[in-house]
Amino acid sequence: MFKKRDEDQKVQESMSQNPEASDHEEEEHYSFLQETFKDEQMTGKKLRNIICKTAGKGLIFGLTACLAFCAARPWAEVIFSGKSGTVSIPEDTDEDVTEKDPTGEGEGDVQQEEAVTYPALTVDNYREMSRALYQVASQANKCVVEVSAVKNEDNWENIVYDDVNSVSGTIVWENALEIIILAPARIMKDAQSLNVTFSDGVTYPASLKKQDRNLGMAVFSVERRLLSSSTAGQIVAATLGNSNIVGKGDPVIALGKQFGYAGGTGYGIISSVKNRVAVADGEYRLLTTDIAAAPGGSGVLFNTNGEVIGIIDQKITDNESMNLVTAYAVSDLKQYIEQLSNGKAIPYLGVKGVEVPDSVSEEDGLPEGIYVKEVEADSPVMKAGIQSGDILIEMNKNQVKTVSGFGKRLMECEVGQQIKVKGMRQGASGYVDIEFNVTVGSKE
């Protein structure tokens, strides 16, 4: 204890003898606590400069963000809207026909109907049914549009409403960028520009996306950015139903220009599903109704669920006496619609043929396949050397026996693709094998 006290006393004496050294040592020991203060007064001019610089940087950032948002908005809307830019329409099959004969004319149907007792209908029942059908038609009408073509504006004052060059079509797809519409392609003849009138009565400019003059259908596009909020809010893309299960006697609704003027509504039943129309490279089933139609009518055929089951075009045949609504069965068109909606041309060869019946094949010794009745002028098959009377039996290593099967195989090909077509040609000693390299074309 006394030793510690002596040491402290020595230290104090030393510090008293050399105060400068003491101060210096203390200063070095606590130098890390020292701060340097700069006395600078903030002037109003400097403050204004800082505010202006900050505001300028904020304005530049905001403009850059706006431009980036505008550029990315269409892409983002397509990605996050749940609908991609690629149209995809699932095909139907005949497997769904389980309860009744699709022709509606099988004996089993008649016997089954005779065994059922139906209650007597009253006027109130009829009114209720009419109201129910009208509600379905009103909702379905949201996907029906009128496509009109402007040809010569010099005579606009002499054109009455019923003479407007237009056809009815249906909205088959819609996304954040465009509204896609299917309608008869005949509207394109001599057209200088196109317009589309939606169910709210408002008209917008349209453009041709793709057409096929072989079947006579086209797909048109309206840019969504042009639509008002009210028009965009009431647009509904059609639900494409399964026409394979449609039978004779089924109730249907016809909407569009089937009577010769736009906005028509007709109710009736299916009168026949047995008819077919043949075009180059294929054939398509027709749905015939008991609803009256104008010779050049067009429109959309719906079932009572509001689903599209047919595309009406009274130009399907050249028969002027056909005054009943007739439509292409939509199930036969789904792959076709998907191709056009994605901007792809429909493959075309130019063969008009019929399938060789089994009975004729057995009796006359004809090969099974497609008998070529006619080859269209300047078509790919004519250039390849295929002639009338040839029987086609294979396409791209796939056997073909029916006209519809021939068309389906062709739809699997790409325009410009070279394919091998095998067939049989009658010679002096019977049918001989023939083979052709054909380049798939299109008829736009």
Image: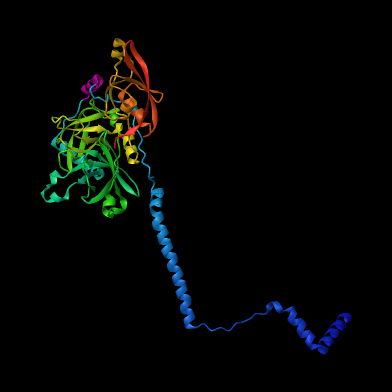
- Residue 306, image x, y percentages: 26, 39
Q: Residue furthest left?
A: 158
Residue 282 lies left or right of residue 66; in this view the side is left
The total number of labels drawn is 0
Residue 188 lies left or right of residue 413; in this view the side is left
- Residue 398, image x, y percentages: 39, 24
Does the magenta portion include 112?
Answer: yes
Q: Nearer the viewer, residue 234 or 325?
A: 325
Q: Residue furthest right?
A: 3
Q: Residue at x 26, y 41 (%)?
A: 170
Q: Quadrant of the C terminus?
A: top left
Relative vertical location of residue 283 with respect to residue 391 in this rendering, above or below = below
Q: Which residues are magenta?
A: 106-116
Q: Residue at x 71, y 79 (%)?
A: 31
Q: Quadrant of the N terminus?
A: bottom right
Q: Nearer the viewer, residue 193 or 76?
A: 193
Residue 158 lies left or right of residue 190; in this view the side is left
Does the magenta portion include 315?
Answer: no
Relative vertical location of residue 225 with respect to residue 293 in this rendering, above or below = below
The dominant secondary structure in magenta is helix
Q: Quadrant of residue 60?
A: bottom left
Q: Residue furthest bottom?
A: 17
User: Can residue 305 be seen here?
Assistant: no
Relative vertical location of residue 235 with respect to residue 409 in this rendering, above or below = below
- Residue 287, image x, y percentages: 23, 30
User: Can residue 143 be seen here?
Assistant: yes
